[in-house]
Image (tube, rainbow, N blue to C red):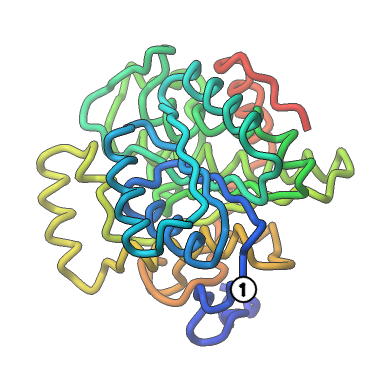
Amino acid sequence: MNEKMAKNQFGNKGWTPERLGNLKGKTFAITGTTSGTGFEATRILLSKGAKVVMLNRNPQKVEGIITTLKQDLGNDIDILSIIIDLGIQASVRKAATEVIEKVTHLDALICNGAIAQVPKQVLTVDGFESQLGVNHYGHFTLQALLFPLIEKSKGRIVVVGSMGYNMGIKTIQFDDMNWDKNYSANPVYSQSKLAQIMTVYELQDRLKKAGKTGVKAYACHPGASSTSLIKTSGSFMMRIIWKLMTLSPMVQSAEKGAYPQLMCATEPDLDQSGFYGPTGSGYWTGPVGECKLEPHAKDKSVAERLWEVSEQATGQKFEV
């Protein structure tokens, strides 16, 4: 770890929401806000006066969450709910159209929603392996479609990755993107998160090349946070292991897990080349700041190819 990494730029406590000022007039769109880090990020942004566009797939759950938020923060919170299923490209397109129709500007799109540890290979309606289809392809199309609005707003794209990017095969399995031959829950989840993170740094390069310095793109991770992610899609054994882990000091609250995405969405002059999250042992918990990113996550030739493959697979050009 270099000297820059060893010292947290935000002090011993790291970044916390205390750094947030009044966010009235700011608009944030977040995927996956009905639980975990997405819910906590929504709650904190609303409490600071921001407008939040909640992007979720379950209308019933959303209703309950909005009721809870109004009970906690008051009836005058500025919240807009739009239904999206990241695993269905048509749904992503419909949701993006709705955002553009209903929102005049977008200070940040936070790509937080995800599925994880799917025990057996499942394909989306578009024919993609589900973890790659939801986590990467769904968000890739959403970013591409909302980019003009984000650019007009001089806004940000924040991608919530995972330390899982550093597990598995540490590259993209281009010859079998659906893992038909060697499907396994963990490596495929890692692959989807690596794809998401690589796309952020490739986007940065493209923005720089196009001279578009108004838009910023960030990658972060929540550390090990007590969320429903594994409970929702993981195998029975994985759910038991995770339940035991959440009772240990190795896992932090979902609220703390939301700090990295909030920081990336709001902190002025934050270095885009960084990778942000909890900085404690193994990057599981601890003060939020810059974490070491392994070189394979910035492999330029792989990232360029992934961008092309993603455009072809989704049928969506991501014009910068």
Residue 65 in view in this figure: yes
Expressed as whole percent of the image width and height from the top left, the position of residue 266 reads 63, 63
Q: Quadrant of the N terminus?
A: bottom right
Residue density around tag 1, few if under 14, some if 14–19, many if 20 or more, within 10 Å: few
Expressed as whole percent of the image width and height from the top left, the position of residue 261 reads 52, 58
Q: Residue at x 37, y 56 (%)?
A: 70
Expressed as whole percent of the image width and height from the top left, the position of residue 301 reads 68, 34
Q: Name the residue beneath numbered marker 1.
A: 21
Q: Is residue 242 left or right of residue 292?
A: left
Q: Quadrant of the C terminus?
A: top right
Q: Is residue 225 above or below residue 281?
A: above
Q: Is residue 193 above or below residue 270?
A: above
Which sits in the foreground, 256 or 133? Answer: 256
Q: Amino acid at mark 1?
A: Gly
Give the SS element for disc 1.
loop
Q: Is residue 60 above or below residue 45?
A: above
Residue at the right extreme of this rendering: 211
Residue at the bottom extreme of this rendering: 12
Q: Residue at x 87, y 38 (%)?
A: 210
Q: Residue at x 66, y 45 (%)?
A: 106
Q: Residue at x 73, y 46 (%)?
A: 204
Q: Is residue 186 left or right of residue 94?
A: left
Tell me how many marks there are. Answer: 1
Residue 222 in view in this figure: no
Q: Is residue 92 left or right of residue 179?
A: right
Which sits in the foreground, 119 or 33? Answer: 33
Displayed quadrant of residue 143: top right
Expressed as whole percent of the image width and height from the top left, the position of residue 171 reads 51, 37
